[in-house]
Amino acid sequence: MKKWLKKSLIALGVLAGVLLLLNIGFNIWLQRGLPHLIKKKIEYQVHYQSLSVDIFTGNISAHAINIKTLPNNNPKIPKIEGRVEQIEIGRLGLYDAIFNNEISSSRLNIVRPHLTVVLPPKNNEKKKKNTTIALDELQITEGHLTIFRHDHQKLLSAQKLSVTAEDIAMNPMTESKKIPIVFSKYHLSGEEIYFRPDDVYAFNAQKIRTENQQMSIENFTLKPLVSFDEFQKKFPKKRNLFDVSVQATAFTDIVLTEDKIQLSDVQLKHPRLKMFTTSAAPEKKEQSFSYKVELKNVNFTHSELEIVKPNGQRNFYTPKLDLAVSNFRMNEDTAQGDLPFNYETFDIRAENTEYIAGNQDIRVKNLHITPHAFVLNGNTVSTLQGNKTGTQIQLNLQQLKGDVEDWKIKDNQLFATINAIHGKNFNGNLTAISETPKKVKAIKNAIGKLTIKETRLDNFHLTYSKNNQPLHVKNIHLKMNNFVMGGEINEKPKIELADYQLNTGTLTYQTQYYNIRYGQLSFNNKKFNINDLSVLPRYSRAQFTRMISKEADLYTIKVKSVSGSGSWNFLNTTPSLEVQHLLVNGADANIFRSTIPPDDNSTRPLYSQLLREMKFPLLIKNMDIKNAHLVYEEDTEKSVGAGKIILAKLNGNIQNLHSGKAKTSSRLIPIRITAEFMNDSPLKAIWTMNTASLKDEFTIKGTLENLNAEKINHFITPYMKMKAEGQINRLSFDFKGDKTGIEGVQGIDFEDLKITVLNDAGEKRGFLTGVANLFLRDNSKKIPNQIEINRVEREPHRSFFNLFWQGILSGLKKQLI
């Protein structure tokens, strides 16, 4: 037993001695033979001060290594030149490295490497790689690295680069991933980092470091290497060019595993982004996004954002933007959507934001937006200077805020439900420009469905002007419930509105000849009321007569109130108006016409034709006119003043007033009128129109009673230079007609009728008076109660009332003479 043990110990000692000699011999060979082997086998010149390899532990160390590429001009290898102060490798698996193409080590330490590398041209041939690397710890200390492409264009550089990483792994499985290397803990610091990935951009960072699991980057920039004009010429298919700078960037808990990038608490201070946009068509979206990006909390503070249009003009700008996003996620699934990412919540705050939409400059003094609320203060919209088409806009809105229930973008359309929107203190000035606006291409409908449950607009003031004719509305208050807007992407959006309430103060509107005004308006989806409505001439009668080129009426109208109830829709492309009852109360109207200007010989359609040709459905089932006063005045070149006809205490009722597009069981429109003719004589009339008749057929019948002939002197004395006296006890008429003429029956009962013919001075002309009374019947005892009125042809350029008067006049000629 002792002899066997002795032999075993001797054998072990001999083996240990042999291994020791082998280790010593191997190190001697490395010192003397390795340089020759390196020179023979590789295309680099490598010098080192010392090299030590422990074949038992796998520890390797080398000092003062210098490397330089041999001048053989081999284009397939990278050209390397520089110096490494020290390299240490701990527990390298030599056998696996040599025979199994597997590299594993407990530690790789590279001290003060100063290297310049020129990469070979890119080889598109795919080479199968089966190398496996497992490294417990990597440490690079104070490195200085510069990498050039094969054309000596700088690709990457870093100064004072120090890297520590643990649990590094790379194998055939990771090589197929977007991130071919994985690791757990890391530490990184460096200065003057430069990276140029392509011919468009260069990345720079003044400092980068990690401390307490937080990485920080100082003065990061992404700068374009070409001007915007050069970018558009060289890269016509690219849509955007970026110019980015960030004063300070920090984030924690970086995780890089296979295809996943995860960061926490991302902080960007004073980032500045300038984006130049082009007219290039958007490229087709990638069908697959292989990364998994998760950013738990992202914060941009004091950001500056600018977007520039292809013509060089600013499209969007804000000098101060704060953005916070939590749980930002982007992966293969989210990339398929219209928004290629999702999030838990966000918070946006900005100041002095400017956005150019078409010809309009939109500005917001400050805003705050979250997924469920927004507040915009100090809002203005103004038309850009130099715009000569469309409408000049100047809008000011003190505040607009909203409460959002949910929203999403699907198939390039917005779907949103907003609980409430409130706008207050609005001043708007719109000026229409006479030049015809350019035709614009139809744009797709971006709103799939927008629902606003409650809308309130308070204290709005609006001015609209066209052809120097301004319209002013003060103190507008609007409330809407359940506003819905939307439609298919290639259709015009449709609008639905459950109910609303609109109240306004004074409205004034200046037209070419009139000042139109009302005192107050109340309007909702069921009823409306207008108070103190007036239409007043801007010019005197003499001025108006000189201004017009053809005969026209001059109106002076005042109405105490107009009110109605029913249902109506003005929001869709085809508006509709259905009024159950309309009341016009206290109307006082004066109509003046001078026959001095030339006749207007254009054809005047009758009222039934005008109604029939209206482009939208109009139906007023019942309309009342109460306590009205109507005066018609007419003068001629030779008249002394204007002839006057008065209808006092005028009351009327109109039923089934409708347009051709309205749905109604009858096309007849009956109109009933009662009044005091010339402030004295009762007048009753029933007038019926037929909108279904293309001939514009109508009937009108009525009576006039107890008319003192002297009452009509207001009209005939200045107009015909005569006076009448006597009594018309009753005048009746029953006419029918159409757009070509009128006919019917007429009756009259009168007594003691005489006329006096006057000269220009208003004095009686005795001879002519006597002759006239010879031909004038003084009573109606010898004439029939009713006579037939033969058809009177209508002059197409005259009105319906002129045609009616011609029918009356035709009967009077037969009855009085």
Image (spheres, helix red, strand yellow):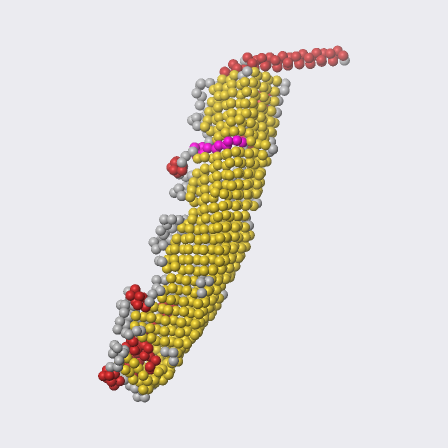
* Residue name at image x 50 percent, y 50 percent: 376
- What span is colored magenta in the figure? 198-208
Whether residue 803 is visible here, answered yes or no, is no
Residue 152 screen position, x and y as percent: 43, 26
Q: Quadrant of residue 554?
A: bottom left
**Above-or-below relation of 565 to 61:** below
Residue 634 screen position, x and y as percent: 31, 72
* Residue name at image x 31 percent, y 75 percent: 643
Of residues 665 and 294, the one nearer the viewer is 294
Q: Quadrant of residue 660?
A: bottom left
Q: Which residue reaches farthest left?
A: 767
Question: How many badges with numbers are in the image?
Answer: 0
**Above-or-below relation of 734 to 465:** below
* Residue name at image x 45 percent, y 38 percent: 242
Residue 140 screen position, x and y as percent: 56, 25
Horizontal relation, residue 690 to residue 53: left or right = left
* Residue name at image x 51 percent, y 41 percent: 302
- Residue 679 lies within the magenta run: no
- Residue 202 lies within the magenta run: yes
